[in-house]
Amino acid sequence: MTAHRIETIGFVRGGRSEPTDDDWGQSHSFIELDPVRFGADAFAGLNAFSHVEVIFLFDRVLPEAVEVGARHPRGRADLPLTGIFAQRGRNRPNRLGVTVCRIVSVVGTQLSVEGLDAIDGTPVIDVKPVMREFLPRGEVRQPDWVAELMSAYW
């Protein structure tokens, strides 16, 4: 496989300090851009959007904890054995997380968000505005177990 170099654009500041599985909906945190690489103009116009997609690195997942096959989500034997690419767990091969968050404010190189399920100090890879045209077209379907598992997540 080919390796690619991706540079961090900034870090999550505030919010939670532990990666727990539920109650992320009220989490308030900031994305602080690297001031050496970016100025406030990098966020110009972002405050016109209601939501942003944040791509981040699960940097505290140890290499030996990475999953490449099937597992029971959250280690729950009552849930079906499911491949890592049919889940959103943090023990992924490239340890990338993606979350849609509500924008609270944009001030300089600091983006305040609500509902980011990343912990304080997490490296941020990219930020993208949420646009209706990029949302799913048509019905979104998922197995029944997902709604049960995610019932307390937000």
Image: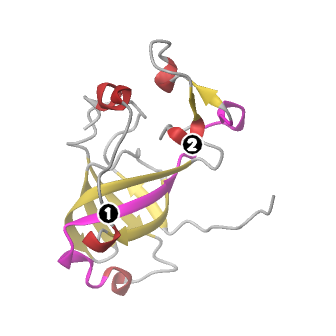
Element marked by disc 2: helix
Q: Does 22 appear above or below 11?
A: above
- Residue sitting at x 34%, y 82%: 40
| Crowd class of label 2 (few under 14; some 14 to 19; many from 20; radius 10 Å) | few
Residue wearing tag 2 = 85
- Residue sitting at x 31%, y 45%: 15
Q: Which is nearer the eye, 70 or 113? A: 70
Q: Is residue 126 left or right of residue 66?
A: left
Residue 22 at what x, y percent from top left? 31, 30
Q: Which quarter of the rendering shows the C terminus? A: top left
Q: Please, what is the three-letter code of the amino acid marked with disc 2?
A: Phe
| Crowd class of label 1 (few under 14; some 14 to 19; many from 20; radius 10 Å) | few
Q: Which is nearer the eye, 140 or 39? A: 140
Residue 3 at what x, y percent from top left? 77, 62
Q: Which is nearer the eye, 146 or 38? A: 146
Considering every residue shown, the one lying at the far top of the view is 78
Element marked by disc 1: loop
Q: Please, what is the three-letter code of the amino acid marked with disc 1?
A: Arg
Magenta residue span: 44-68
Q: Is residue 82 left or right of residue 19?
A: right
> Which is more N-terminal, label 2 or label 1?
2
Please count the marks in the image: 2
Q: Does 126 appear above or below 147?
A: below
Residue wearing tag 1 = 137
